[in-house]
């Protein structure tokens, strides 16, 4: 990623040009969105710049795409018009905030000069600052760029917050400010954050003593390790100390899942029994960058004794019941790496997931578990798995990710419809990767039209639609013959004909699915869509375990 420092002469650039340059400084090469009259001038600037604009079919889809782009690239951006565009992207940005994905929301707005004489301008809701008020709840920082004297400084401040906190931010650009060249521009004073030396020393000494005494230590790694670029430090810490690694569901693929120290996903009673037992038998659990959410904790079935835990995130550090302030996660991990002695804990046979050669039963009806087993034979270093919510996610936890940070899913915020537009963002963030999307039919009906954007850009994504005519997860959570869980069946495999490109397949048996996957995998000319017809009662084992817990709550 390019330098984050501002080195450009304020006198040489307009507000719009400066914003574009700063986006490039943070490594943003694509902006997703839909143009509208309040942002057309800025879109014109974008098209003339090195940044590529990616038009989407809906604003919320653009937000999902920017979110996935940020997860792979480090930061993303979405650009929309005032209110009708900005308010449409709120759900996507809420998910980005919840899961710490640094997305820059850029919205046009009415010009400052036209507001006094035209108080009822189109798209306006209540007050001119209504949209800003909404995004204050969804973003870590924001600014209305209505004052040329402070615009550059505000841009720097907001982008710095996105980079530092890994959360979305909001910038509102009135249309008559885009081409304004400020006469003066006070510099932004970036605050350099460093760990408190005394707190660091005390925390590290306590943690090292606790880990050195442990006979069965384990590292439980979460998504912040990825968000803050600490994957190499994680592996170095584990290898030097010989401590096994498990990951949370949201942190899946934070480490290469073929690494000899990796044991699997820990998610309480939802997870594989062997992994759950191995983690919960540990006498010291080092949690690094993990969100303690209900889904990550297997709907609170996780059994982690706080007296045996070291809990370190970007926001807090707790060892047993002692809290340490002013300690940066990366600094803490590096200090542990330098001071920890090697351990002797071994991983028993059967804990690590192993794949067996898939034995095809060509005429057998395809099931979710058998589909995942076949997909494991297809996983490659460049495969980027994008799982939607429901059994798309729960079943995909059994996929063994060959690379690192190549599993994307909204596993905490759990917004249906994320996966199709997310594949778009993941592709542009890493063009050499191959998106493999697993999506339920209900989720696809929400945002599936973004497949047309993949057709437009000839993106070789492989989309698997689990077709069970409804909301399968909710059927398990609230059993009964409920009509509200049913949806109209679509001929999904025919949609490429509607969109004018891509290829469609339908599979009801293992043989048909294997053939469809082989054809889709070999086709790099554009996207492929495989409609997998599964039984209404079919589900992954993880979903069955989840339903047993949640059915008592819903």
Image: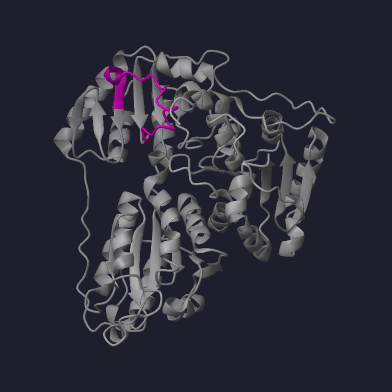
Q: Is residue 101 left or right of residue 6?
A: right
- The structure residue drawn at horizontal position 47% and vertical position 28%, both measured from the top left corner, is 550
Q: Is residue 459 left or right of residue 352?
A: right
Foreground of the two, 148 or 48: 148
> x%, y% of residue 46?
47, 75
Magenta stretch bounds: 291-310
Q: Main secondary structure of the magenta part?
A: loop
State which quadrant residue 317 falls in.
top left
Q: Is residue 105 left or right of residue 455?
A: left
- In this rendering, the answer to whether 173 lies above or below 202 is below
Is residue 195 inside the magenta stretch?
Answer: no
- The structure residue drawn at horizontal position 79% and vertical position 47%, both measured from the top left corner, is 519
Is residue 303 inside the magenta stretch?
Answer: yes
- The structure residue drawn at horizontal position 49% and vertical position 72%, both measured from the top left corner, is 50
- In this rendering, the answer to whether 359 lies above or below 107 is above
- In this rendering, the answer to whether 430 lies above or below 83 is above
> x%, y% of residue 196?
17, 40
Foreground of the two, 134 or 553: 553
> x%, y% of residue 219?
40, 26
């Amino acid at each position: 990623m390019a330098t984050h420092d501002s080195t450009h002469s304020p006198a040489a650039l307009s507000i719009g040009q400066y914003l574009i340059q700063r986006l490039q400084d943070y490594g943003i090469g694509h902006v997703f969105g839909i143009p509208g009259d309040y942002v057309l001038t800025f879109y014109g600037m974008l098209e003339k710049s090195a940044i590529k604009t990616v038009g989407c079919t809906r604003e919320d889809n653009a937000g999902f795409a920017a979110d996935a782009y940020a997860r792979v690239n480090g930061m993303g951006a979405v650009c929309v018009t005032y209110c009708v565009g900005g308010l449409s992207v709120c759900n996507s940005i809420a998910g980005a905030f919840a899961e710490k994905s640094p997305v820059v929301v850029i919205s046009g707005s009415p010009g400052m000069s036209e507001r006094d004489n035209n108080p009822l301008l189109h798209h306006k809701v209540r007050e001119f600052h209504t949209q800003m008020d909404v995004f204050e709840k969804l973003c870590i920082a924001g600014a209305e760029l209505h004052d040329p004297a402070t615009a550059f400084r505000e841009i720097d401040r907001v982008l710095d917050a996105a980079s530092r906190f890994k959360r979305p931010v909001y910038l509102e650009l009135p249309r008559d400010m885009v081409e304004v060249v400020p006469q003066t521009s006070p510099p932004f004073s970036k605050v350099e954050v460093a760990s408190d030396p005394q707190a660091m020393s005390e925390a590290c000494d306590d943690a090292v003593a606790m880990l050195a005494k442990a006979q069965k230590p384990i590292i439980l790694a979460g998504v912040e390790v990825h968000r803050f670029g600490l994957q190499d430090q994680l592996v170095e810490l584990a290898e030097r100390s010989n401590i096994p690694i498990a990951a949370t569901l949201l942190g899946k693929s934070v480490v290469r899942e073929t690494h000899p120290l990796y044991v699997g996903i820990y998610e309480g009673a939802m997870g594989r029994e062997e992994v759950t037992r191995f983690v919960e038998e540990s006498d010291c659990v080092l949690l690094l960058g993990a969100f303690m959410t209900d889904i990550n904790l297997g709907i609170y079935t996780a059994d982690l004794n706080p007296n045996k835990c070291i809990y370190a995130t970007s926001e807090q550090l707790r060892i047993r019941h002692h809290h340490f302030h002013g300690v940066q996660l990366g600094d803490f991990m590096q200090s542990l790496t330098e001071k920890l002695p090697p351990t002797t804990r071994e991983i028993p046979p059967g804990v690590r997931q192993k794949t067996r050669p898939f034995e095809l039963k060509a005429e057998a009806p395809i099931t979710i578990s058998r589909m995942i087993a076949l997909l494991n034979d297809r996983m490659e270093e460049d495969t980027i798995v994008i799982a939607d919510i429901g059994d798309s996610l729960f079943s995909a936890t059994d996929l063994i990710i060959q690379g690192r940070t190549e599993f994307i899913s909204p596993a905490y915020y759990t917004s249906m419809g994320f996966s199709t537009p997310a594949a778009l963002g993941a592709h542009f963030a890493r063009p050499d990767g191959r998106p493999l999307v697993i999506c339920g039919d209900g989720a696809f009906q929400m945002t599936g039209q973004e497949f047309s954007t993949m057709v437009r850009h000839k993106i070789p994504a492989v989309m698997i639609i689990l077709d069970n005519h409804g909301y399968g997860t909710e059927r398990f959570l609230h059993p009964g013959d409920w009509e509200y869980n049913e949806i109209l069946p679509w001929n999904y495999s025919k949609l490429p004909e509607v969109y004018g490109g891509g290829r469609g397949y339908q599979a009801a048996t293992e043989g048909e699915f294997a053939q469809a996957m082989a054809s889709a995998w070999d086709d790099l000319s554009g996207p492929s869509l495989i409609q997998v017809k599964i039984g209404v009662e079919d589900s992954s084992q993880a979903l069955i375990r989840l339903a047993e817990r949640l059915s008592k709550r819903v």
